[in-house]
Amino acid sequence: MPSTSAPRNHPDAACSVAPYWIVMGDLHDSTARFDAIPGLAEAEGVIVTGDLTVTGGVAAARRVLDALSARNPRILAQIGNMDRGEITDWLESEDRNIHARVRLLAPDTAIMGVGGSPFTPFGTPSEFPEARFADWLDHMWRTARRSRRVVLVSHTPPRDTRCDRLTDGSHVGSTAVRDFLLECQPDVCLCGHIHEARSLDRLGRTVLVNPGPLAAGGYAVLSVEERGLSVSLHTLADECAM
């Protein structure tokens, strides 16, 4: 079962042995905090959970990922609801897309992604019905389940968890993602979208992680070790109050 303790390999820890990935999301065109992330260059790579831009297309996404790849060239990313759909094709052409895709983080560890969000009151560029999320998840799981360990990257958090709770206490996450997690129980679900819901939580055996927006100092570290996955929340020292 995944651990929520700090990975031993992270630069903040005393020992550095296992491969780790930096997890970030809700970048919204901003590249200002990349240099403040400890261990970014040394990481196996970077996982971006979505919202590279603010309603932007390929040109805007390219500016963000070019700046990020200058620090670490290995990037896996997907659209958020604020990104235009054309970004998916561009990420695919760059061999970085995880939206509706299954890839390998390690020989026995699969990663699968669902970008965008269910419908919102704001009419953002990449919103889809819950049935579409359910179809994507079902299709990917047929492949991902062959791996010993599975990481789901869902821009939208699962419904009724700490990771999807607004400041007024209401929950706005995806029911399809929640249903999938409860039924299939992948090891980890990395999400974003709800900025104020930075948290760790669980659904059954699945560890849920919403690192919050990087502009507010939030990111996570996913460690892929032989003994299992570990994931932890981190904040930049000079972050704004959440």
Image: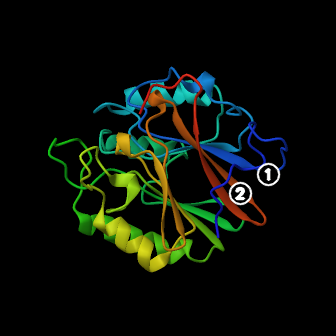
Which is more N-terminal, label 1 or label 2?
1
Considering the numbered disc 2 on the image, is that residue within a helix, a strand or a loop? strand
Q: CA distance from mark 2 to mark 1?
A: 7 Å
Of the pair 81 and 201, the residue shown nearer to us = 201
83 to the left or right of 39: left
> In the image, residue 70 lies at what x, y percent?
63, 25
Compared with 111, 168 (above or below) is above
> In the image, residue 133 lies at what x, y percent?
32, 64
> In the image, residue 99 lies at what x, y percent?
43, 54
Of the pair 18 and 71, the residue shown nearer to us = 18
Q: Quadrant of residue 167?
A: top left
Q: Which mark is residue 18?
A: 1
Disc 2: which residue = 224
* Residue pictured at 37% horizontal, 40% vertical: 195
* Residue pictured at 62% horizontal, 53% vertical: 231
Q: Residues within 10 Å of mark 2 (few under 14, many from 20)?
A: many
